[in-house]
Image (spheres, helix red, strand yellow):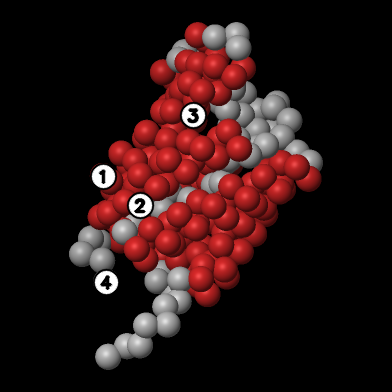
Amino acid sequence: MSEFTLSRRLVAEALGTAMLVGTVVGSGIMADKLSDDVAVSLLGNTIPTGAILVVLITMLGPISGAHFNPAVTFVFWLRRELGLAIAGCYIAVQILGGIGGSLIAHVMFELPVWQASTTVRTGSSQWVAEVVATFGLLACILAGIKFRETAVPWLVGLYITAAYWFTASTSFANPAVAIARSFTDTFAGIRPVDLPGFVLAEFAGAALALALFSWLLKSNKPTV
């Protein structure tokens, strides 16, 4: 049982997801303003995202576990480390926090607060990329918890930094972030109509990671 009340855990999840999305969207806006080169803008979006993940997981992980991601919460529910009701609450506040992060980024950059993205992100290559991205993210988390829990913030931050560049989708790997990014018609956006494919792919990648790593991480060392 956590030493923190459920209300504190939910606030940590909402705050962490809001700060994550605010960083993703805000750095995308800033990068797009500073450069006409898409590759440079993507780099300007990548580095802050990886960095803030290290900060947020280190800062809020002891309170809520620092999921900030319904796919992560889904896996911990499947592992029976969260009850269904608490998992549902986690996912709800992650989505709300993420949307809040997009809106705050708009306010900071003097853009219309309420937006709907027009950026097309669809097709089998994008969906496969999201399966791969989320699989890798959960692999980092599950293996990190098993072998070096204190390294998890860095594993996640560095993995997402890399996955921005080796996946065709630029590695959303997070249904709450995907939903929040549909509320911004900026560099980081995704059309609302494209969300179902991304969200399904992300949950599929998470489930695949759990299936494989539940077996892979099982030691043959006899228990005393």
Q: Which residue is mark 2?
A: 152
N-term-proximal mark, 4 vs 3: 4
The nearer-to-camera label among 2 and 4 is: 2
C-alpha span from label 1 to label 2: 12 Å
Count neighbours of disc 1 (C-alpha within 10 A) and say few if under 14, some if 14 to 19, many if 20 or more: some
Q: Which residue is mark 1?
A: 59
C-alpha span from label 3 to label 1: 20 Å
Q: Horizontal and vertical percent for residue 164?
A: 55, 35
Count neighbours of disc 2 (C-alpha within 10 A) and say few if under 14, some if 14 to 19, many if 20 or more: many
Residue at image position (41%, 41%) is: 157
Q: Which residue is mark 3?
A: 46
Asked if disc 3 and disc 2 are in contact, CB closer than 8 Å, the reply is no
Count neighbours of disc 3 (C-alpha within 10 A) and say few if under 14, some if 14 to 19, many if 20 or more: many
**Secondary structure type for disc 4:** loop
Query: For the residue marked with disc 2, what is the amino acid?
Result: Val
**Secondary structure type for disc 1:** helix
C-alpha span from label 3 to label 2: 18 Å
Q: Is residue 100 among the parts visible in the rendering?
A: no
Asked if disc 2 and disc 4 are in contact, CB closer than 8 Å, the reply is no
Residue at image position (55%, 40%) is: 163
Query: For the residue marked with disc 3, what is the amino acid?
Result: Thr
Q: Which residue is mark 4?
A: 1
N-term-proximal mark, 2 vs 4: 4
The nearer-to-camera label among 3 and 1 is: 3
